[in-house]
Image (cartoon, grey):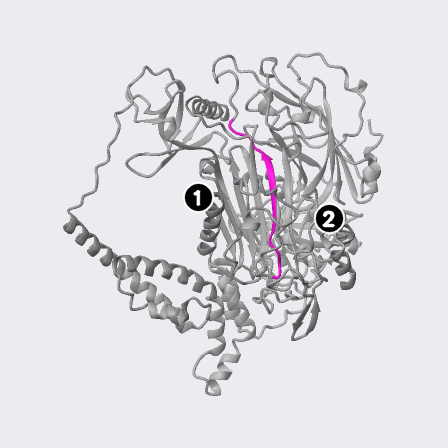
Amino acid sequence: MAAASWYHRDISRVVAEELLARAGRDGSFLVRDSESVAGAYALCLLFQRHVHTYRILPNDEGLLSVQTIQGIQAQCFHTLPDLICAYQHPNNGLVTPLLYPVHRAQRAPDEDSDGEDGRGGGHTASTVPATVGTWPSAPMACQTHIPQQLHQRLQEQIHSSPASDFMGFMAEYLNHHVQLDPEALRLGHPQLRHLSTALATACRPLHSEIDFTLAGLETLARVFDPPVSPHSSAREQGLLTSDPDLELLLHKISTVNHLLSSLENKVLKSLQETVSRHNLALPSVVTGPPPSAKPLAVQSFEVKAGKSQRVVLLVDVELGTVAITKRGSGSPEEVIPQDKILQLIKYQSVQNKVRLVWARESQKSLGRDFIFPSARKREAFCQLLQLMKIQHSNLDEPELISVYIGTWNMGSTPPPRSLASWLTSRGLGRTQDETTACIPHDIYVIGTQENSLGDREWVEFLRASLKTLMAIDYRVVALQCLWSIKIVVLVKPEHERRISHVHTSSVKTGIANTLGNKGAVGVSFLFNGTSFGFINCHLTSGSEKTHRRNQNYSDILHSLVLGDKRLGGFDLTLRFTHLFWFGDLNYRLDMGMEDILAHVTKKEFQALLAVDQLNLEREKNKVFLQFSEGNISFPPTYRYERGSRDTYVWQKFKPTGVRINVPSWCDRILWKSHPETHLVCNTYGCTDDIVTSDHSPVFATFEVGVTSQFVPKEAPGSGPEALACIEWESIEVILKTTSRSKCYIEFHSYCLEEMQRSGENTFQNCDIPGFLKLGWSTKHLPVLNPILPDLEYLGDQHLLLSIKGVESCESYGECCIALRSMIGSTAQQFETFLFHRGEETGSMRGWMRVRVPTERCSTRERLYGIRPGSAPPRVAALGDAEPSPALLGRSRPRSLPDATGYTNPAYFIFEGVP
């Protein structure tokens, strides 16, 4: 059933308010998906120039009701249209009846204007919630030429089947070709010709996977059976070609089946002959004597293991062991030496839970979960294990690591034999010096688009290339693919144990957001205590499609599921210490072809960057807010003549005519980091010798500061427990909204045992149209007590704040505050912008201080210092005398622009506020 026109699906609160503002009449309304409760809706209603938002919640029986003012009996409805009809009448608890529906804009079918991928076409209808129904007065949706029942089954499969990419091809078949096959049969054609074509196209990626597997199986078969396999002739007849013929594919599968079924017998027969001929036997494994027992001087932790079992963890730092003992038992169940401990993983969702992973001689590694009485106890246990590892190991935890980012649109052609220039950052732009080019990086993140290789084949090709260049066998952290968009994360073997909480995700932004020819893939993980996010995307092509690319960016931000689940309500760009976003962004140059070529010839790149669509959209705050990009000193990376880097080919001949693709910096690498963290971009350039695609590969390398498990000077539990505290004097917020809702603030941080919440705002002003000013006094703001009170620990921590409406519980904006510069003997001012779903939604400022116990103020020298321009922390000991805040000068922080630099004049109301 078609969706009612007033139902706008998952648009943001900001967009909803803009649509209602354009409508301008009291009683104008629309419905969107709730951002705070899955499966719920938000009813947005305009009255006296303000937008009022009501939550529509389902009960246990699936009936819908509106949360309205107290004293009004809640009514329940089976469908949204029934609910909306009922609230057209007055005295139902809303500020005004629902009078004028704001209709959803109809988006034109998406097209790949350049035809770069060759996989798209047609339009697939978007699905809507079954409870939405049809607005009584709305015209009926146009009937599709597909039978209704078949079309509904298709939509269900696209969203429920794990093979949704495959179903995308079937969507195109059902939308455009399903009626042609019966006609062909009627005319005497022996097969479903169009279905065969669609299946062959959908199965094309399977060829390279089978070729890769088949080559390895045949090689192994020859080892144990020297005569050539009877099926090898098939390979000589073209198995390594990407012929989509279904018979060839079936022949390949049959060959793989034959080799797999016969290989075991061949290996067994060969081994039997070898053993009987040479009388061979496997040598026995010699094990060393068990370590001599020492008196245990331990710290004990009573924890829960599993659902109900109680055990005691005994940590002996001097001996270097962790013993697991059942409560009430005299002897330990298992003793784990420190060198067998592989990982210590702190759960993000449960602050007092940890997973200990260790190696066993008799079997694979074992991992067990333990639940401590509190987050502080868990932290003490982790500190002891880190201290134990430091004392018994020569390996120090790194403070700086190097990260390599590479992006390349491969143009659906195989790569050259060597990727040396790309992986060693050599070519054009800011490149690696030849003397340091072969110094291996700690982490390699490779993003590709239009990559026709099989997933495993591509990963092994990258690993082999790095092993040839660096003599290191890099380990795979993650691989995520969406059709031909791939991201691979590789790490040095010694860092493998430092990686945890790996998450992957993908988002389709192709035709009707159901096809994966365009979209994004992402990976996130923790490196010790530092969170990383990596996003590789391929956005809509075409010089005129800037707005569509911006929408792609917004869709990816909203739909990509990465990082800590507890931070799901925060803007994706705030969930990580460091977030890298790269790929074929497809933004073009707004300049004539002849002028572009003239500037490129003279290497006048600044003139071209001034008309670069991505730079222009960033200046308008449309995309990539607060992101950074290295200086571009290399020529546009698209669109080259394949086989050469001397000529740009800007004409593309299509059935609809000639399309002009001007040279552009389509391939980009950007990043965003938490404030007062360490990240330096050392290289940013492109290769000049890889010519198989019409894009040049792009690279960037970074020096990144990371944190590890903090170990205090004094061992945990050696003295009385002192507490640090985070105190607030006041907070002022300005929101871009037409709402008048009361709000509260949520405080999130890994240094807190749990999320904290403020009271409702004590001050509110909406005198300036389109803006809401809120204020909180110190009495309504919580005092926060971090898990650890040490200055060095707190200097690495950040707070995430979210402003939420009391009625809707939806976020109006989020921000990140570094604690480092807030550590001081007096309250310090902070000021920052608020973001939500990739948009700037307001600003926040206030006064706070972080107080540290005097005995916990020691620090150590680091390999990297505080960012240039920021002052060192001012130590605030508990009990220190402090001057009155009224006597302090309240100057604007250097980290923010002057008031005249704000893009919105309404921000001037910050100035002059005492």
Task: Name the amino acid, label 2.
Answer: Arg
Q: Is residue 384 above or below residue 44?
A: above
Quarter of the image holding residue 2?
bottom right
Task: Report the residue at 70% width, 30% height from top.
Answer: 868
Q: Where is residue 238 in the image (x, y as percent from the top left)?
A: 41, 70
Q: Where is residue 481 in the image (x, y as percent from the top left)?
A: 51, 54
Considering only order in the chain, which callout, 2 or 1, is on the residue closer to the N terminus?
Answer: 1
> Where residue 473 is drawn, which disc sits there?
1
Q: Position of residue 454 (x, y in %)?
A: 46, 58
Q: Is residue 210 magenta?
A: no
Q: In this view, does 253 lie above or below 77?
A: below
In the rendered structure, which segment of residues is drawn in magenta?
Answer: 694-709
Q: Work out whether residue 234 can be spotted.
A: yes
Q: Position of residue 790 (x, y in %)?
A: 58, 20
Q: Which residue lies most toward the bottom here?
A: 187
Q: Name the residue carrying label 2.
A: 618
Task: Report the residue at 49% width, 71% height from top.
Answer: 198
